[in-house]
Amino acid sequence: MRYAISYVSTAKRSLSETEIRQILDDSEINNDKQNITGLLLYSEGNFFQIIEGNQQQIIQLYETIKDDSRHYNIIKLFGKEIQKEAFDGFKSDFISADARYSSDRLQNYKRYLEVLDKPTKNAVANILKAFIV
Ligand SMILES: Cc1cc2nc3c(=O)[nH]c(=O)nc-3n(C[C@H](O)[C@H](O)[C@H](O)COP(=O)(O)O)c2cc1C
């Protein structure tokens, strides 16, 4: 059984775009190595993340991420067992001000939420909508 954790957080103000892109890139590299799938988005000062994988590994990674001083205000959206992972790899994306209104992009990310039960899916879809548009 796979396990998934999702949260939103606020990036530390002093982070440069380069430093944020570094977090996104490092996460993709580390997660791919460990068979952790999911999504990490950055938009206008906030992060949104879903990590999926072996339960113990995911809980441990979430603890590490929570302790990372490059962000704060970490709000957990859910932590639950899932039947099947929504993502076939780990993807991160920096959503710049110009791309914020691209609803295609939002639809693309929402597609991955199908794996969640209905109330969770609806809650996360609403947060994603507020996050991206
Ligand atoms: C918003 C945010 C998301 C992160 N997501 C991941 C992630 O998905 N995978 C990962 O390995 N590290 C992620 N990190 C980095 C970890 O917090 C940590 O720096 C990294 O795992 C290296 O940890 P270590 O020094 O204990 O090996 C993230 C950091 C931030 C600020």
Image (cartoon, rainbow, N blue to C red):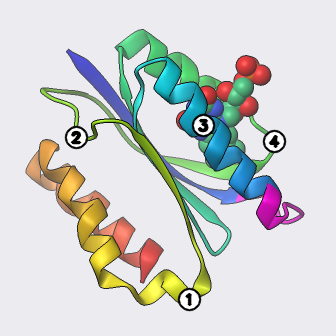
Q: CA distance from mark 3 to mark 1?
A: 24 Å
Q: Is residue 104 magenta?
A: no
Which callout, 2 or 1, points at the residue further toward the start of the chain?
2
Left or right of 21: which side holds 86?
Answer: left
Name the residue that disc number 4 marks.
69
Q: Is residue 16 magenta?
A: yes
Q: CA distance from mark 1 to mark 4?
A: 28 Å
Q: Secondary structure at mark 1?
A: helix
Ligand 1 - quadrant of the structure image: top right
Which callout, 3 or 2, points at the residue further toward the start of the chain?
3
Q: Is residue 49 above or below residue 79?
A: below
Name the residue that disc number 1 marks.
98
What span is colored magenta in the figure?
11-18
Residue at 32% over, 72% down: 106
x, y percent for residue 102: 38, 85
Q: Secondary structure at mark 2?
A: loop
Name the residue that disc number 3 marks.
27
